[in-house]
Amino acid sequence: QVQLVESGGGLVQAGGSLRLSCATSGRTFSNYAMGWFRQAPGKEREFVAAISWSGGTTNYADSVKGRFTISRDNANNTMYLQMNSLKPEDTAVYYCAIGSRKYYYGSSTDFASWGQGTQVTVSS
């Protein structure tokens, strides 16, 4: 059974930084793309970033380009999201997900399993 556990969320002031982690087990982590999504209160879940199986290809939502960086450590089955220059509109529950293929092809259906989420709150 695949398990994904997010950590690193919290409360930060606008302009600050946070680093989220996603630890996985139960699946060959290095074979699959990984991704981050977020859901703000009253809104649909939205794509944030994705990374291919090797880390060689990354994708970002326009709203986070230049501020967020996704990375992965295949030796330790962990993915990260470095979030800089945070804005109040980044406030959401952030979820990590593991894909069913090596690359992200543009749909949340590319992802097979999800974590429970970690809250990120950015104050103005």
Image (cartoon, helix red, strand yellow):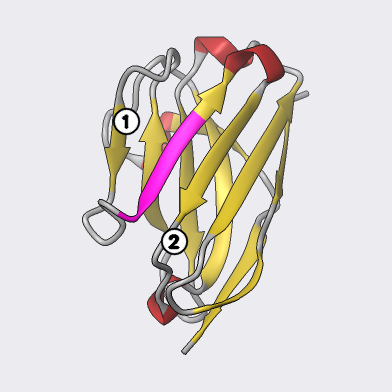
Residue sitting nearer the eye, 11 or 23: 11
Q: Which residue is mark 1?
A: 58
Q: Is residue 70 magenta?
A: yes
Residue 46 lies in what quarter of the image?
bottom left
Give the label on residue 68, or none: none
Q: Is residue 51 magenta?
A: no
Give the position of the N terminus as an image quadrant.
top right
> Where residue 65 appears, x then y in whole percent?
26, 52
Give the label on residue 45, or none: 2
> Where residue 7 appears, x then y in whole percent?
71, 50
Q: Is residue 74 left or right of residue 67?
A: right
Disc 1 and disc 2: Cα gap in Å? 19 Å
**Amino acid type, callout 2:** Arg
* Range drawn in magenta: 67-71
- Identity of the residue drawn at 64% across and 11% down: 28
Q: What is the residue that sits farthest to the bottom in this orientation?
A: 124
Foreground: disc 1 or disc 2? 1
